[in-house]
Every structure is written in C-alpha cells, then in structure tokens.
Image: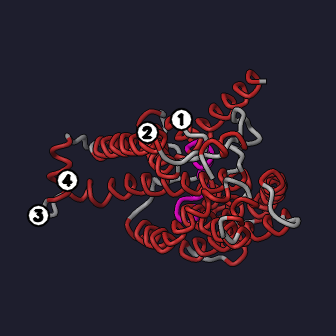
C-alpha cells in the first residue's frame, strides 16, 4: 500500500478519539531517529548530573572516577550503591512505561489508551495489596502479586471489551470502568489492613524509586530483558495501525498479534509496578510528547522510550531536589500529568 493511499485513507487532524496512521520512511523516519538520539543523549547527561547531586555533591569527573574506582571508598559506595540504582531505575523504568503506553495508544488509536488509564497499573497494585494485606507476604511475593494482578486485569478487560474483534474505544471505556472498581477494592483492602501494613502499602502505592537498590533493580531489568522478544511483534503493530482488514490482507494474524502485543505491554508495566509501585502518567504523556517532537502521525516507539526515560528521571530529580520535602516520584508525575491532560483537553476544545 502506497504512502498516498495510507494518507488519504486516514486523513484528518489527530484528536482525542483517534489519530492517523503513520507513514513510514522518508524524512519522518530520519527525524524520528534524530529525536530519539538527541533525547537519549540529554537523558544520559542528566543522569550524570543526577549522580553528582545530593548531600555529597560531586562533579562529573568525580562521578566517573567513583564509578570506575577499584578501592571501594566511601565516594564509590555513594555513587555505585546508593545513587546509581535510582538513576538507572528511573531511565529503564521510564522507558518501559513509555513503550507500554506507546503500544497501547497505537493499538487503541487513542492518546488516552495508556495502561494507567485502562487499569493495568491499578490491577498490578491490587495484586500487590492482596499479597501484602491478605496473604501477609513480603516484598518478593508482593512483586509477584503485582505481576499476576496486572496480567489478570488485562485478561478481564480484554474479555469484557471483545465483541467480534477489538475496538480501541471499547477497550478504553471498559478499562476505565474496571479501574474504578479496582480503586474501590484497593481502598477497601487498605482500610481493613493493619495500620503499619496499610501505611507501607499506601507509600508503595504512591510510586517511589527512592529505596530502589540493586537487589530489586537487577531482577526487574532481567524481567524486562526476558520480555524483549515482544519487540518482534512491532512490525505487526505497524500493520495493525492500517486497520484489521489491511493487516489481514498483508498476512498478519490480527487477533494473535494483538494479544501478543497486549501481553508484552502489560508485562512491561507490571514489572515496573512490581518494583516501584504504580507511577502514573509517564505511559500516557511520553508517547504523545514523542509524537509531537517527531512530527509523526503515529506513535514512534524508540522516541517514546527515550522521552519516557527523560521524563521519569526529571520527575525524580524534582522529587528529590526541588520539592522542599522528599516525596515519591509518582506524586510529581501525577502533577505533571495533570497539567499535560489539561493542555490536551484545551487543545482539543480549540480544535473544535
């Protein structure tokens, strides 16, 4: 199918309800690659600066020396054991959340189609709460509960939204309804839990990477790497953006590909939620910011991941060094996401 046909078949300006199908190739691909590279470089520079911020301020040269030092002094401990897991976690988890949001927004063809809106992050939190408050499990079991909760929520939403095929708008509406019910269930679990357990679960539920260390980060990164074969379905995702009929005509197994992409995206957000708690709005905002930076009609996955890493790292720096009191990064992303959502709604109102 030619670029002209694809453009004419999906003409119109992007709105809250849908956006056109991307046209692959040409200047759009070059600009997307350039944006992904520039944003990644900015994120790495910001990460280097973040490693030097704190009660023990360090210059970039001192940071590099501490990272590669062999004597294991105090500065090396501060950089490698205390600060590096948090900075690396912000980059990796931000990229994973943004990639998950990009996949869901592409599947639903709706900028509101992100896992935190549809309810998968909330389902992961419910699974962790059940492990903490009902079973009385520890951190590892809570992480497993979050992963299982996210996957089960995805299954329920998918089954409820499926009617002779999957439509993005129906998936979002069902997901919002399931999210509301899960929020009520989470509140019920917190109210019935013991005070110390409820406090710990509530703090974890705010979404924080302040206590992230290598014992938590390494298994999460391994889990994300094990999910990486899901990237092989990205070409099918681009075909699905043309519509189910066009994708089927090109030899794509529509429902199998869609289910595989949903599982991949849910696994990404569930692994992050299991490690940090639910961090809202990164999956919602990062893909749309990347789309505007690249000028693409569709959602660029690589640029979305780079923007997500930069957004979460920046939000964590605000939570640490700008806000007078050290707060969970999830609170900062909710504030920033609320501003983004208001801006999106204003733009939509003006476009009409």
Q: Residue furthest right?
A: 163
Residue 101, percent from left and from top: 61, 52
Work out how far the residue at label 1 is from the one at label 3, CA to CA, in angstroms.
Answer: 49 Å
Marks 2 & 1, CB-CB < 8 Å contact: yes
- Using residue 157 as the reference point, say whether residue 44 is left or right of it: left
Please tell me which of labels 4 and 2 falls first in the chain.
2
Disc ID at residue 19: none
**Residue that label 2 marks:** 31
**Residue that label 1 marks:** 295
Residue 332, percent from left and from top: 55, 40
Q: Residue at x 48, y 56 (%)?
A: 93
Please tell me which of labels 1 and 3 falls first in the chain.
3
Q: Secondary structure at mark 1?
A: loop
Q: Quadrant of residue 168?
A: bottom right
Work out how far the residue at label 3 is from the one at label 4, CA to CA, in angstroms.
Answer: 10 Å
- In the image, which residues are magenta? 273-286
**Residue that label 4 marks:** 75
Please tell me which of labels 1 and 4 falls first in the chain.
4
Q: Residue at x 45, y 38 (%)?
A: 27
Q: Residue at x 18, y 50 (%)?
A: 64
């Amino acid at each position: 199918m030619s670029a002209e046909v694809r453009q004419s078949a999906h003409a119109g300006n992007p709105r809250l309800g849908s956006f056109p199908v991307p046209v692959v190739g040409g200047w759009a691909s070059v600009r997307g690659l350039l944006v992904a590279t520039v944003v990644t470089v900015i994120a790495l520079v910001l990460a280097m600066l973040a490693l030097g911020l704190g009660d023990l301020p360090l210059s970039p040269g001192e940071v590099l020396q501490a990272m590669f030092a062999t004597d294991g002094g105090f500065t090396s401990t501060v950089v490698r054991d205390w600060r590096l897991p948090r900075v690396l976690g912000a980059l990796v988890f931000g990229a994973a959340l943004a990639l998950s949001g990009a996949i869901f927004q592409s599947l639903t063809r709706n900028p509101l189609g992100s896992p935190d809106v549809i309810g998968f992050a909330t389902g992961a939190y419910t699974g962790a709460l059940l492990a903490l408050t009902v079973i009385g499990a520890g951190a590892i079991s809570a992480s497993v509960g979050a992963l299982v909760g996210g996957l089960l929520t995805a299954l329920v939403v998918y089954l409820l939204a499926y009617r002779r095929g999957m439509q993005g708008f129906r998936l979002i509406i069902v997901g919002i309804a399931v999210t509301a019910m899960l929020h009520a269930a989470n509140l019920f679990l917190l109210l019935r839990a013991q005070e110390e357990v409820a406090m710990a679960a509530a703090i974890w539920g705010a979404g924080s990477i302040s206590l992230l260390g290598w014992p938590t980060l390494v298994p999460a990164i391994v889990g994300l790497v094990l999910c990486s074969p899901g990237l092989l379905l990205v070409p099918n995702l681009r075909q699905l953006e043309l519509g189910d009929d066009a994708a089927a005509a090109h030899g794509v197994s529509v429902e199998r590909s869609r289910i595989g992409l949903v599982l991949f995206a849910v696994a990404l957000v569930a692994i992050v939620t299991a490690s940090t708690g639910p961090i809202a709005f990164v999956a919602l905002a990062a893909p749309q910011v990347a789309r505007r930076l690249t000028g693409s009609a569709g959602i660029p996955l690589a640029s979305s991941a780079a923007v997500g890493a930069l957004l979460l790292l920046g939000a964590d720096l605000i939570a640490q060094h700008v806000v007078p009191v050290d707060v969970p990064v999830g609170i900062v992303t909710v504030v920033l996401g609320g501003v983004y959502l208001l801006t999106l709604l204003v733009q939509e109102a003006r476009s009409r």
